[in-house]
Structure formats: structure tokens, C-alpha cells
């Protein structure tokens, strides 16, 4: 039975059944301003900025920051599930392995690869993968169209990661596996789309490029989340 009060979030506005999850509070604000007609801050506890409102199409949507790392994202998602979230899309960033993804490219995560660390606490041994909810992943892919490609992304606790530790992965991030695995345990439909920031040690892309790519990803996520009939 779900608890009445979450442990970390202290919502001051209604939480929608659909949520976009981002690591960075600044990106939460960016997407709230881009996607919501009259965004209202729904959480500021612990610096985890969250916003709620309706999209231009009239769909109720929550946009919530999750902080840094998989454990933080898992805890925030657990709170959101307590508050009634039923489906969620992570919109985040990842670091490409070599030239596997160009800066600003969108990757629709078809599998999150565990690379040790906290992955075991989410039920994934090193080398195992966790997949997104199939129907939501398909809807996200359809919304992204030619703007993204499907990819396996390694999820780990610290950066950088050596490609040999993540064979078959195009890039690495710190949250996607935690989100997908936690969502599965909570019976929340979840998927993810990530913005590649370029290769580790390479030139950092301009903020404008990353913001534009994140906005495109956010719009697709909102569209994918708009249908409440997402089943396993």
C-alpha cells in the first residue's frame, strides 16, 4: 500500500500521472517554460525543483528534477509514485564513447547496461541490461521520429567510463538504469531519451546546442506521455 506522504518531495501543487524526469534543476525550469502553459512550482524541497501545469494540448504534466546519480533519481521516482505518477520519461544527458554519438544527438534508450556500483541495488548485475517499458518506448520513438536513434547506454556511478567496461554501449550516463529498474518495481511505465554531450575529454558543446536538443527531447517526451493507456 502506498504511503500518504513521500519522504523527500514536499509538493505544493498537484502532481500529474505523467512526469518528465531531469537531473538538473535548471533543465527542469527550461522544460517547464517551454512545455507548460502556466507552470507552477510543485516542489523546491532539497533543491529538487519540480513544476506542474498543462501543455498547449491541455495535458496535465509534471516536470521534476532528480539530482545527480542513480540513487537520487530512484528515491525521487519512488516519491513521485507515492504521489500518483504512473508513467515517466527521463530526459537527460550522456557522454559518448569515442565517435559513437555526436554532440547534441538524441538517443532513445533501448537498454540501460549495468556497469557495477549501485546497479546491484536495483537488481542488475554487472553486464545485465534493463529495458524501458515497451509501449512507452515505442511512443517515444514515434514522437522523436528521425530526430533520434535507438541506443544502449551504460549507467554507472562515476564518470568517465572506459568503453571496455561497457561493450555495446554508445554512451554512458548516471541515472537511466536506476530510473528504468525502479519504475519496473513500482509498476510505473518508464522510458528515456538522452542528449549526447560529446566524447569524454572532448570539447564541451555550447549551452545553446544542449538546451535546444533537450527542448526537442522534452517535446517528444510530453507527446509520448500524453496517452494514459500505456500497458505492459
Image: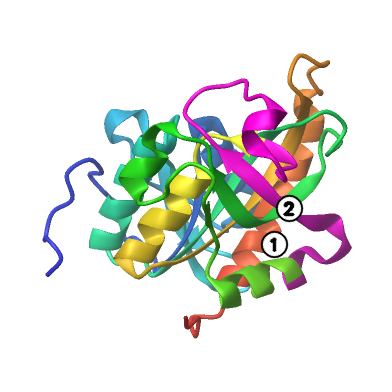
Position of the N terminus by quadrant:
bottom left
Q: Which residues are magenta?
A: 142-171
Q: Secondary structure at mark 2?
A: strand
Residue 56 quadrant: bottom right
Tell me which label, 1 or 2, sits earlier in the chain.
2
- At mark 1, the secondary structure is helix
Q: Residue at x 49, y 40 (%)?
A: 175
Dot 1 crowding, Cα within 10 Å, few <14, some 14–19, many 20+ = many
- Front residue of 137 and 22: 137
Q: Nearer the viewer, residue 54 or 201?
A: 201
The correct choice, above or below, for 49 with respect to 40 in the image is above
Instruction: Give me the residue at 53% from left, 72% from top.
Output: 59
Where's residue 230, x and y in %?
50, 81
Q: In the rendered image, which residue does mark 2 sit on?
A: 151
Q: In the image, what residue occupies the spot 35% across and 29% down?
A: 47
Q: Is residue 63 visible?
A: no
Q: Decide whether residue 152 is among the magenta residues.
A: yes
Q: Position of residue 12 (x, y in %)?
A: 26, 49
Residue 105 rendering spot, x and y as whole percentages: 82, 43
Residue bearing mark 1 = 220
In the visual, does 83 lie left or right of 122?
A: left
Q: Residues within 10 Å of mark 2 (few under 14, many from 20)?
A: many
Cα–Cα span, label 1 and label 2: 17 Å
Is residue 165 depicted above or below 119 in this figure?
A: above
Amino acid at each position: 500500500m502506498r504511503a500518504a506522504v513521500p519522504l523527500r518531495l514536499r509538493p505544493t501543487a498537484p502532481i500529474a500521472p505523467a512526469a518528465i524526469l531531469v537531473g538538473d534543476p535548471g533543465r527542469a525550469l527550461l522544460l517547464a517554460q517551454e512545455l507548460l502553459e502556466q507552470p507552477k512550482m510543485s516542489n523546491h524541497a532539497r533543491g529538487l525543483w519540480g513544476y506542474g501545469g498543462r501543455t498547449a494540448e491541455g495535458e496535465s504534466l509534471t516536470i521534476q528534477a532528480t539530482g545527480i546519480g542513480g540513487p537520487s533519481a530512484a528515491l525521487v521516482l519512488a516519491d513521485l509514485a507515492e504521489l500518483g505518477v504512473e508513467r515517466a520519461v527521463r530526459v537527460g544527458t550522456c557522454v559518448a564513447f569515442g565517435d559513437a554519438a555526436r554532440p547534441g544527438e538524441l538517443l532513445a534508450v533501448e537498454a540501460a547496461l549495468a556497469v557495477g556500483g549501485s546497479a546491484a541495488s536495483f537488481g542488475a548485475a554487472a553486464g545485465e541490461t534493463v529495458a524501458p517499458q515497451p509501449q512507452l518506448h515505442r511512443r517515444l520513438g514515434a514522437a522523436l521520429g528521425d530526430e533520434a536513434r535507438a541506443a544502449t547506454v551504460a549507467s554507472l556511478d562515476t564518470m568517465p567510463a572506459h568503453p571496455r567496461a561497457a561493450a555495446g554501449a554508445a554512451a554512458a550516463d548516471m541515472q537511466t538504469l536506476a530510473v528504468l529498474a525502479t519504475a519496473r518495481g513500482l509498476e510505473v511505465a518508464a522510458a528515456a531519451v538522452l542528449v549526447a554531450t560529446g566524447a569524454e575529454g572532448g570539447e564541451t558543446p555550447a549551452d545553446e546546442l544542449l538546451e535546444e536538443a533537450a527542448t526537442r527531447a522534452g517535446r517528444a517526451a510530453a507527446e509520448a506521455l500524453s496517452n494514459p493507456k500505456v500497458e505492459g
